[in-house]
Image: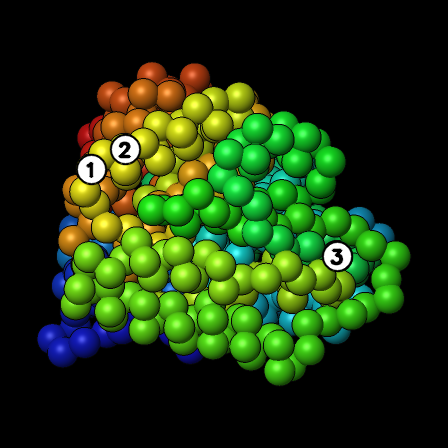
Amino acid sequence: MSSTTSGKNGTWRNWGGNVVARPAREVTPASVDELAEAVRRAAEDGLKVKAVGTGHSFTSIAATDGVLIRPQLLTGIRNLDRDNMTVTVEAGTPLKRLNLALAREGLSLTNMGDIMEQTVSGATSTGTHGTGRESASIAAQIKGLELVTADGSVLVCSEKENPEVFAAARIGLGALGIVTAITFAVEPIFLLTAREEPMPFDKVLADFDELWAENEHFEFYWFPHTGSTNTKRNNRSAGPRKPVSRISSWVEDEFLSNGVFQVAQWVGRAAPATIPTIAQVSSKALSARTYTDIPYKVFTSPRRVRFVEMEYAVPRAAVTETLRELKSMVERSGLRISFPVEVRTAPADDITLSTASGRDSAYIAVHMAKGTPYQGYFTAAERIFTAHGGRPHWGKIHTGDAEYFAGVYPRFGEFTALRDRLDPDRRFQNDYLRRVLGS
């Protein structure tokens, strides 16, 4: 199921419904050669070029009025190398298909985010991540990349080959070229035991460092207007496999997480005053549960209620203070927030514009239902995040610009210099990249 739509007169919309674009033309190349040819033709016609995945970004990072490249024919596994424990996949492959294909081969990625609808290139180019003490971002698991650059040539990079491109292109924002294939590190499939349990907000914050240190993957959701959270710890397990039963999976993941939640969004939109009461009820509806399964069945879950989102990475040491400020802002503001706030962590990595570049990070994500006015909440939250030197997720709503990023990313200049070299005519430019990278 593609989450983007091409409507009448060639309009394109993203999954959250907050970005609309009208490209001059759309191309669906069936090979890397066809993609390279589409880039060369765009240059001849003086048009900009952008590739778009499933539209799960809430920013206009993929929007263009030039040539829109859709990668859905560039899918599948190109090569599985059991000696080096890597898999090379075409850029348009959805994460869901990659996870299923790897599981069939007895393999898995080390970590992943909680949604798997995105294409591998869209997810990695924007810095999509899960939560983890030793691992989090999908891009940090990349061992090699193939991309078509602005002159239509194919460039391959890894730690050994074009290492300066590799350092930046793993989270390249679509600014350095169009990714056509990605090589990921994989490992033998393993089991994870998930333990989900409610915990008071103040207790999670007081014990945060311990909860982080004692678990391979720790995350929690705080319900605004309440002092309640739901925590989730995922740790490797010797088994046996004990999946969530189908009926309780339906009750908890579909009925409570998606169905009741959707109704709560409708009621909350119609009668905002009821939101704090709904929040109290929903935060109490979740009971503790433990289950053991293969990684993608534990890490990921369906998200059927459409929303818009802002997420910032702050230094891990600043997370509890940032959350306290966020909670008191919500209490003072009179805002009515019907979506939980999600908190995850990532270790420092060496990718130029990764939100965890060079620093251990914690992520705080705020959400609002699709179609509700989110600006007041997001603006107030963003003020708190940026005061802590926060770095926004490249695919989620934020107002950051090149001047701000030059201050929070020590290697920002390295990225823009590489872009000058690979795309001097700004073939891959759009309004979003002009804002976040400068022109």
Q: What residue is disc 1 on?
A: 333
Marks 2/1 in contact by CB < 8 Å: the verdict is yes
Q: Which amino acid does label 1 sit on?
A: Ser
Q: Position of residue 97 (x, y in %)?
A: 58, 71
Foreground label between 1 and 3: 1
- Label ID, residue 329: 2
Q: Which of 79 and 324 is in front in this view?
A: 324
| Foreground residue among 34 and 65 | 65
- The CA span between labels 2 and 1 is 6 Å
Q: What residue type is labelled 2?
A: Met
Residue that appears at 18% across and 76% down: 7
Tell me if label 1 and label 3 are in contact, CB under 8 Å: no
Residue found at the far bottom of this picture: 247
Instruction: Look at discs 3 and 2 and give the one toward the viewer.
Output: 2
Q: Name which residue lies at 23% across and 50% down.
A: 336
- Badge 3 marks a residue whose secondary structure is strand
Q: How packed is label 3: few (under 14 Cα within 10 Å), some, or many (20 or more)? A: many
Lower sequence index among marks 3 and 2: 3
Residue 221 % position (x, y): 48, 48
Classify the position of the C terminus by image quarter.
Answer: top left
